[in-house]
Amino acid sequence: MLSFQRVGNSAYRDAQGVYNHIADPNERRRMALAEVDKAPFGWYHVRLIVVTGIGFFTDAYSLFAINLASIMLGIVYWQDEVNNGVMPHNADTAIKVATSAGAILGQVVFGYLADFLGRKKMYGVELIIIIVATLAQSLAGMSTAVPIVGVLIFYRVVMGIGVGGDYPLSAVITAEFATTKYRGGTIAAVFAMQGLGQLAASLMALIVIVAYRSKLEPVLSVADCSGTCTEAVDRMWRFLIGFGGIPGWFALYYRLTIPETPRYTFDVLYDVEKASVDARKYRYGKQGNTVNPLTQAQVRYDMAKYRTPRPSVMEVLKFYAKKSNAIKLFGTSFSWFFLDLAFYGLGFSSPSLLSTMGFDRKDNLYMNLKNTATGQLVLICAGAIPGYWMTVFTVDKLGRKTIQVGGFAILTIIFCVLGFAWQGLEKMHLLVLYVLAQFFFNFGPNATTFISPAEIFPTRVRSTGHGISAGMGKFGAVIAQVFFAPMIKKGATHANPTPWIHGVMQIFALFMFLGMLTSLLVPESKGVRLEELAGEGENEDVYELQFRSNFFARKERGSGSNSGGDGTRGQRGVGAGRGGNRHMKRGRWWKL
């Protein structure tokens, strides 16, 4: 029975040495990766989900907690005759958009660095950024030189860089360690931690509100909060924001001590011995699976003259400039872009929904804050969390493309109803449609747009492709918050605060339809090995280790079997079989 080990590698566990005698590196690569791809689902996969998922838990907590904290910030810092305890719209939008803006930079930069420097070197750095920036936010205060809004925007941009970096790193590491049969569900489970993060933010808000009940109940409204009430609310938002950094501490050690993924070690670092051992460690544990320094040194010596430089920016651009690859990247990027335009925009109708559910009572400040937190809690449990986990349990049976295209189609219908029949909808109808939309966002494109980019690109450029796709998604989130949020209030009156919301919903219906069309460009990856998705095994553009003939066969080196002036020895190895008799240029041992 597999046991939890108290070491960093235990979250990413590395058969006894059954193929150390095999000299051909392609054969060793295929057998080593088979240890990962064909492994039955076990505790080591659960640990993988937990450690990588903690980052998404923290991300979602921080992004969701600010919605509740902004109400408290308004009470503390905008208690004047003009604002009456309510944060100005521009300040509220800037604080919320800052994280998404920082995430765009983090997704692209960390995505490329994970391909250039390695997954291991970058993993954990983004979590440190999130933890430090979260703590800094909770300690921020007003000053005469810099307003609280400026300080919070700065730290939320920094936090957003860490949040963005977590997207490509966690997705790609999970994909490269997961078994083929359950790869989609494993990645989806990591992403589903977002739902638990949102749930935790609502629960934490409810806890701090109840804890300070005695200070809040005597106050009738946000405009009347002063003295001890202001002091209590000031503490509440700091506890709420600061708690988001705590879960990250439990995963930080494991992230900083993970082994490099075997695929990256094989295909970028060219350390065949280390990759083979790491693949066995992941599956069977450390015992009996250690690197032989002499063998590793010999392998590295042999590989040195065939090494290809690490992925450069030009190599990445050249790869994605190819038509077939550009089409895939366009599909993953713009389907995510259209998704987030509506996903973040749907929150505009939350106040109406809270009223529908009876959570709009404002007898006093305590009831006001408590009902807001409770209403958000109910909405998350009703639609978002079930949708996340429905994807986890069905994505490897139904397929990514089926869920994504079907989800977009259903969301198109929902937004058409919201947009064209808004005036005739009762509040209960609005609530049902909102819950259905949340369900099919998460049992649909919100999960699958995260999964597919981590699977369909080659190892050398996989993380960059995911980072670009995720960055386009967050760009859509920024547009939704900056442009569409003010649009719904155009011509607002006290009786009708959102006169343009039906028009925005019609636009979102168009975006969902476009998302469905762009999803057709993304290939299905259900049950397919990552190497096959990258093109390995096809007649052209072979993606595997392309070695000169059998240079690895050490026992034959003294036999005088040199084949001629090209420097090859013996007969062609297994790795050259798929590519025919093509010869690689000196310094190249594979090709994209």
Image: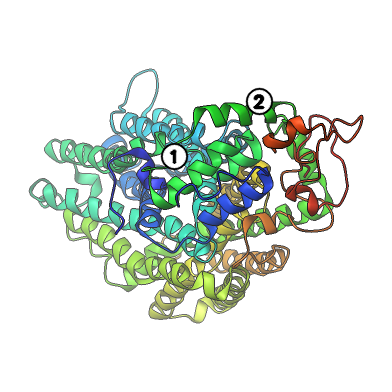
Which residue lies at the image location 38% right of the left edge and 42% below the top edge? 286
Q: Quadrant of the C terminus?
A: top right
Total marks in image: 2
Residue 32 percent location from the top left of the image: 56, 50
Mark 2 packing: few (<14 Cα in 10 Å), some, or many (20+)?
Answer: few
Q: Which mark is residue 95?
A: 1
Badge 2 is on which residue? 301
Q: Marks 2/1: CA distance?
A: 53 Å
- What amino acid type should be assigned to the residue bearing mark 1? Ile
Q: How many residues crowd mark 1 within 10 Å: few (<14), some (14–19), many (20+)?
A: many
In the rendered image of this protein, does residue 583 appear above or below residue 186?
above
State left or right for residue 518 relative to residue 423: right
**Residue at 17%, 38% in the rendered image:** 226
x and y percentages locating residue 542 in the rendered image = 78, 51
The reply to whether callout 2 and callout 1 are in contact (CB within 8 Å) is: no
Determine which quarter of the picture holds residue 556: top right
As drawn, is 324 to the left or to the right of 426? Answer: right
The amino acid at mark 2 is: Tyr
